[in-house]
Image (cartoon, rainbow, N blue to C red):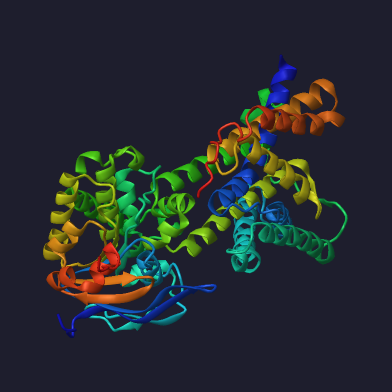
Amino acid sequence: MPETNNTLLEVKNLTMDFGGLRAVDAVSLSVSAGEIVALIGPNGAGKTTFFNCVTGIYKPTKGDVLVHPPEKKSQKINGFKSNRVTTIGMARTFQNIRLFQNMTVLENVMIGRHCRTTTNIVGAILRGKKTKRQERETVERSYELLEKVGLVDDADEFAKNLPYGAQRRLEIARAMATDPFLLLLDEPAAGMNPQETKDLDELIVRIRDTEKIAILLIEHDMKLVMNISDRIYVMEYGKEIAQGAPMDIRNNPKVIEAYLGEETDA
Amino acid sequence: MEYFLELSSSGLVRGSIYALIALGYTMVYGIIQLINFAHGEIYMIGAFVALIVSGVLTIYGFSGVSILILAALIAAIYAAAYGYTLEKIAYRPLRNAPRLSPLISAIGMSLFLQNYVLLAQTPDFLRFPALIPDFEFMEPIAHIMGSAELVILVTSAISMVGLTVLIKYTRIGKAMRATQQDMVMARLVGVNVDNVISVTFIIGSVLAAIGGVLVGSYIGQINFYIGFMAGVKAFTAAVLGGIGNVPGAVLGALVLGLTEAYAAGYISSAYEDVFAFGVLVLILILRPSGLLGKAVKQKV
């Protein structure tokens, strides 16, 4: 799919060095509105590092990260702190689950609303009309999101007590609570059984279609990737080795080589 | 029996003062794993501001309770500004430095603030007016618990309940808990962690300043050095209760205050510190993570 004028995220020649190690080497990638884009590659290819650069956990050594939020002006966000990146409208989840374990399910989602509400400490003490209204809206919106990921019944449970698959969905709900236009999912299906993966697959497509949130995901589960992605980027040893539609990627010799090793004449 | 009650009351008063200061230590530690050694100095500065304000207000003809409230309010605002600035200039630039660096910076700020007050004010003890009036209804039990003690206990209790509610139910409280649990993730869900840390310092400083005003009025004299011992005791209380744990800090402070009061009353006031720190050693041997602290799992 060619780049259209409703590109949301545009990464140009992103490079990240750790001392002498080049973890990400001149990778370019773009995501447009309404797309599900996958980033795949063998372990250690630099996919998560790439995510970390885009979401402000690392400051890239070279290259540009540009965002074009819908109906707002474009920005270059290299080196922005993560909370600013999230406020602009890109939210992410982690490969290993990072919920606030000792808070309830509802509170976890409410924290995601933090950057969209404004009550300060004085407001919290005085509890004026605006504070109360905002608090009510936060709770309502959080319940709505829990409804969408099917966790309403567990709202008052501690996050740590949820089963694994539910924790994953809660992470997605929390990320959605920040009102993103782009959701970055780092291996959302890791450790899930086939049924859970199938549910997740549907959830991701639903988020894209009904919430109008574009998705960029890292994933190892090829079935899921091939099923739902519009476009796929492939990384190996920090470099981008291929990109294209799922069918092209499946038959790309370079990709097969990266995953299965070089073919030798025997 | 009456003697015991008398000692208990004075122990609780000490304990609640320690608690007001200890909360600042424990909240800051909970969020950024820093022992803010300059925290005792904020308490001392709070007491000094209150003294100056009450002097000025007395000249203008204010009296009694109105002075106490205004002095406490201005001291709290002043201390909040100090706490905020302290974090901004001495700790924030070292956020990603090795853990020892901010610790040294904290000790440096502590010495700096002490000597700054020493030069700007005086090395001598200053008389602090008794701002807390004597209530008539306390008359019958005044030999056990006077009005000043009552005011200190009630004020501390209100502050602590207020803090608990703030942490548990408000937006900023949720952000504080989230930051404490996982700072990177808190940022990623859009929490401005820098603001949260600033607010934590401000809250801690306000509580310490309230403690400073109450102690000044209760003991009747202050000097530039009172922050040091109070800081050490409050830190002890925080460790005793399990550092990073808010209810733990209150419990630790009360245990410490009562231990000191009983040791002073039944044995000798010369030994009160021996017993206070003896309890600390004992508890750390038996429960290394403190009374309410949980053993910390090292994050990998």
Of A62 and A176, nearer the camera is: A62
For image coordinates 59% across by 33% down, the residue present is B251
Where residue B36 sits: x, y (%)?
66, 54
Of B265 and A7, nearer the camera is: A7
Q: Report the quarter where the N terminus of chain A lies.
A: bottom left
- Residue A9 quadrant: bottom left
Specify whether residue A201 is in view.
yes
Where residue A56 sits: x, y (%)?
42, 70
Where residue A158 sits: x, y (%)?
34, 39
- Residue A231 quadrant: bottom left
Specify whether residue A31 is in view.
no
Where residue A217 sits: x, y (%)?
26, 64
Relative height, residue B223 to residue B156 (above, below): below
For image coordinates 16% across by 55% down, the residue present is A201
Side of A103 relative to B273 (left or right): left
Relative height, residue B30 to residue A122 (above, below): above
How many circles with numbers are drawn on the protein? Answer: 0
Relative height, residue A87 to residue B131 (above, below): below
Side of A237 relative to B37 (left or right): left
Check the image and name the residue furthest to the front.
Answer: A266
- Residue B79 quadrant: bottom right
Check the image and name the residue furthest to the top.
Answer: B1
